[in-house]
Image: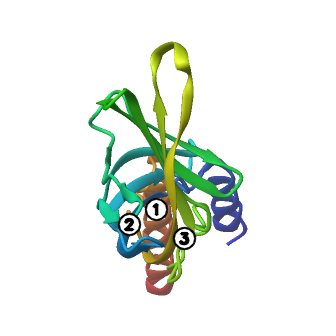
Amino acid sequence: MKRLLAAAVLAASVATAANAAVTTWTITDGTFSDTGTFSGSFTYDDSSNTVTSWDLVTSDTTGPTGGFPGFEYTSSDASQSSSINSGSVSFSADFGPFFIGDLFGNLEFDNIPLSAPATVSALSGTEVGLVCAGTFGCGPFGGRTITAGVATPSIAGAAPEPAGWALMIAGFGLAGAMLRRRKAAAAA
């Protein structure tokens, strides 16, 4: 029995568990202060603290003072990026020529708990636009505040690491050996 316990402790100290979680966040029912909407999803890798893929779409709006254009933030476009800064996740994009310059967009969520996934039923954050016109520099194109939205996490199941498999197989082997030994001792 002491050998079995020693073997189990040794195997447990050698084995390491897979705790790298990959979470896909689905964004639904998003609205902005100017009645625009947004939805989509992004995938966060906890082990590298990076957003690995994203596809988020915002709608355009028009109003008495103009409107805010709708954007598509997607990881399939090499000119777009994502960043994580002290509890917020943001997506930036260069949308190319727009009237007198290049149009840039930035969508930021500031209350999604990336490292401790839980459904967020009241998203907060902003979307801002920026126009850059050659030597004239850059200026704000407008902005809007997120007024509603739901972020739902879906955590991918982690596959056991090789050390985990080895520990499981060793455990079954030791349990089988114990049963065989008890059976032999009972027959004698």
**Residue 146 position within the rendered picture, expressed as x and y whole percent measured from the top left:** 50, 69
Q: Height in image: 172 above or below 76?
A: below
Q: Height in image: 101 above or below 69?
A: above
If you read the primary sequence from the N terminus, does the residue marked by circle 3 or circle 1 appear first? 3
Q: Which is more foreground, mark 3 or mark 2?
A: 2
**Residue 30 position within the rendered picture, expressed as x and y whole percent measured from the top left:** 39, 73
What residue is disc 1 on? 168
Residue sitting at 38 percent across and 66 percent down? Answer: 64
Q: Secondary structure at mark 1?
A: helix
- Type of amino acid under label 3: Pro
What residue is disc 3 on? 117
If you read the primary sequence from the N terminus, does the residue marked by circle 2 or circle 1 appear first? 2
**Is the Cβ of the residue at disc 2 closer than 8 Å to that at disc 1?**
no
Residue most toward the top?
Answer: 135
Residue sitting at 69 percent across and 67 percent down? Answer: 5
Front in this rendered view, residue 156 or 10: 156
Query: Label 1: few (<14), some or many (≥20) within 10 Å?
Result: some
